[in-house]
Image (spheres, rainbow, N blue to C red):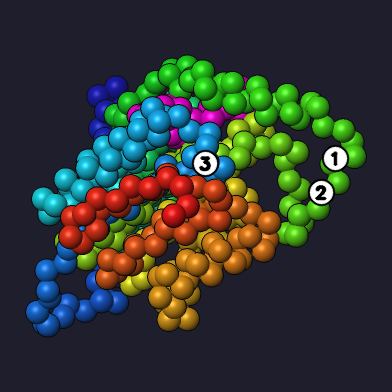
Amino acid sequence: MRKLIPFFLALVFNSALAQAQSLSQSLENARMKQQPASNAPRTAIKPVLVIHGGAGTILKKNMSPEKERAYMEALKAALEKGYSILKNGGSSLDAVEAAVNVMEDDPLFNAGKGAVFTHEGKNELDASIMNGRTLAAGAVAGVTTIRNPITAARAVMEKSSHVMMTGRGAEEFAKQQGLTIVDPSYFYTEDRWQGLQRVKKQDSMKTELDHGNKPTSGLRQPENRDSKYGTVGAVALDAQGNLAAATSTGGMTNKRFGRVGDSPIIGAGTYADNNTCAVSCTGWGEYFILLVMAKTVSDMMEFGHFSLEKATNEMVMKRLGALGGDGGLIAVDKDGHIAMPFNTEGMYRGYIDKDGKVTIKIYKD
Ligand code: ASP
């Protein structure tokens, strides 16, 4: 009997793997049927990469030259890492994951190391990734020990039959996949800790009267919130014409009760479809969820025949604000057009366009 145990374990493992592969495989097959091979000669596609490091109250007058330089350099490093993959014929998926990994490892951003703190003083991370070629997607939410949540999201997409995993289960899965697991203290940064103390102090100074704010959406607004969103994201078009999107975050400072924002929700914070565009969002997550932001942009292009610019402007500059929310997004369409609208003071953002030209910006133009 003892001898049979490893045999049974192997059987169970193999069947789990087969089941996992069948989801990606069936998505792949379905897409192949939808998109019959064309005999028309394809002109060479020039890759494009766009990234963001969060939107919010980012004002030049509050920024020291050193801090500004540090952000510019960090964004450049992420762009270069991702673009080097695209330039060598690599996939948009590899490029967005690599660019996001760089920002997750950089304490300047609210993702991976540098993530904001929850009300209880913990770091709970969310991330998602989507493959525009197959519509396969993966996400993790509320994880506390995975060094690079975006890599875990990709593992969920490629190595499991699920789309989203949360908390301890996601961590166990990441461990099984051989991803880097860290002690929760790895995510601590003094800056973010002080940010939590500030928000909590403002909270305690609020009077009963101040609590009457009524947002247009009916959402109860947090009395105080950090007005800077440092979530990171990347979208890319590769030389094969495939789109991908990725988003990773620590969420919002002082979040409570296992709150999950838009970033790990496919269709809200992240979406990619080769027929339309790839989108990654940043901002007040609750509103992005209500607007199903990323997928709505895609739908406006697919069914309403909007251009990328028109669809993203309509959603971010009109609908988001009308509902009482703020933030921005980055997007690239199947023809390599880029959009980066935001309705906040600034958004850390950058791109490398079809001609290989690097552009990095922080404030409103
Ligand atoms: N959208 C993120 C969230 O609500 C926050 C951010 O963009 O920084 O969790």
| Snapshot quadrant of residue 192 | top right
Q: Residue at x 42, y 45 (%)?
A: 362
Q: What kind of residue is marked 1?
A: Asp
Q: Which residue is mark 3?
A: 58
The chief SS type of the magenta part is loop
Instruction: Count residues near mark 1 (Cα–Cα under 10 Å), then give few for <14, some for 14-19, many for 20+.
Output: few
Q: Label 1's element?
A: helix
| Snapshot quadrant of residue 215 | bottom right
From the viewer's side, name the closer residue of 323 and 5.
323
Task: Please give the range of residues in magenta.
Answer: 105-124
Query: Which of the two labelled residues, at mark 3 and mark 1, occupies the earlier sequence position?
Result: 3
When the figure is inspected, residue 40 is found, relative to residue 123, above or below; the finding is below
Q: Which residue is mark 2?
A: 213
Q: Which residue is mark 1?
A: 210
Q: What kind of residue is marked 3?
A: Ile
Specify whether residue 169 is painted magenta.
no
Q: Position of residue 251 (x, y in %)?
A: 54, 38
Q: Position of residue 159 (x, y in %)?
A: 31, 44
The CB of the residue at mark 3 lies under 8 Å from ligand 1: no
Q: What kind of residue is marked 2?
A: Asn
- Circles 2, 1 touching at the beta carbon (< 8 Å): yes
Instruction: Count residues near mark 2 (Cα–Cα under 10 Å), then give few for <14, some for 14-19, many for 20+.
Output: few
Marks 3 and 2, how far apart in space? 24 Å
Marks 3 and 1, how far apart in space? 25 Å
Q: Residue at x 59, y 67 (%)?
A: 318
- Position of the C terminus, as image quadrant, is bottom left
